[in-house]
């Protein structure tokens, strides 16, 4: 699977797991080094512009973990980390109306 396919699957998973009426979905993730889980924070912006958290089901979190681990492995294997090594966390932003997707990666030093 290539990175664009992984990004698409992450976006679809978030749309499916997010609350109806969400305009923007925001996920902050810190993956465990072993790749068997992580810590997550799920937020969304509703139609009135209010920021609120949401709690997706366990299956969605497990699937998201799997996709993020695949993405991290793909980026390392293809030298897409600008020499920084494997990232440990990320923030995913998805504008639901425009299906505009962005990811910012973080690295532990």
Image (cartoon, grey):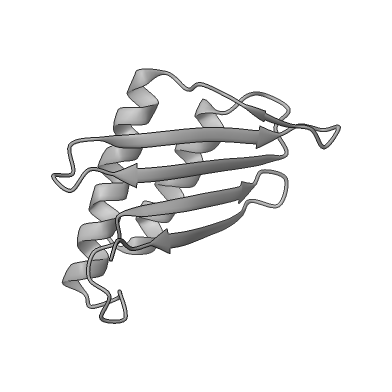
Q: Position of residue 89 (x, y in %)?
A: 36, 52
Where does the image place residue 27, in percent across and percent down from the top left?
51, 41
Q: Is residue 91 left or right of residue 93?
A: left
The residue drawn where x is 66% and y is 43% is 96
**Residue ranking furthest to the front:** 109
Q: Quadrant of the N terminus?
A: bottom left
Residue 7 screen position, x and y as percent: 42, 54
Residue sitting nearer the eye, 3 or 85: 85
Q: Residue at x 60, y 48 (%)?
A: 94
Q: Horizontally, is 94 left or right of 72 in the view?
A: right
- Residue at the location (25% across, 81% down)? 83
- Residue 59: x and y, percent? 33, 22
Front one among 1 and 75 = 75
* For residue 48, above or below residue 100: above
What residue lies at 28% left-to-right and 66% top-to-bottom?
A: 109
> Is residue 69 shown left or right of residue 60?
left
Which picture quadrant has residue 108?
bottom left
**Above-or-below relation of 96 to 90:** above
> For the view shown, which residue lies furthest in the left direction?
34
């Amino acid at each position: 699977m290539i990175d664009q396919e992984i990004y698409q699957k992450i976006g679809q998973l978030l749309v499916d797991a997010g609350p109806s009426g969400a305009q923007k979905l925001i996920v902050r993730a810190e993956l465990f080094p072993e790749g068997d889980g992580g810590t997550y924070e799920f937020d969304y912006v509703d139609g009135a512009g209010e920021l609120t958290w949401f709690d997706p089901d366990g299956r969605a979190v497990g699937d998201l973990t799997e996709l993020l681990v695949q993405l991290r492995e793909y980026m390392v294997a293809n030298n897409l980390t600008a020499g920084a090594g494997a990232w440990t966390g990320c923030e995913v932003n998805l504008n639901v109306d425009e299906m505009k997707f962005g990811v910012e990666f973080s690295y532990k030093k």
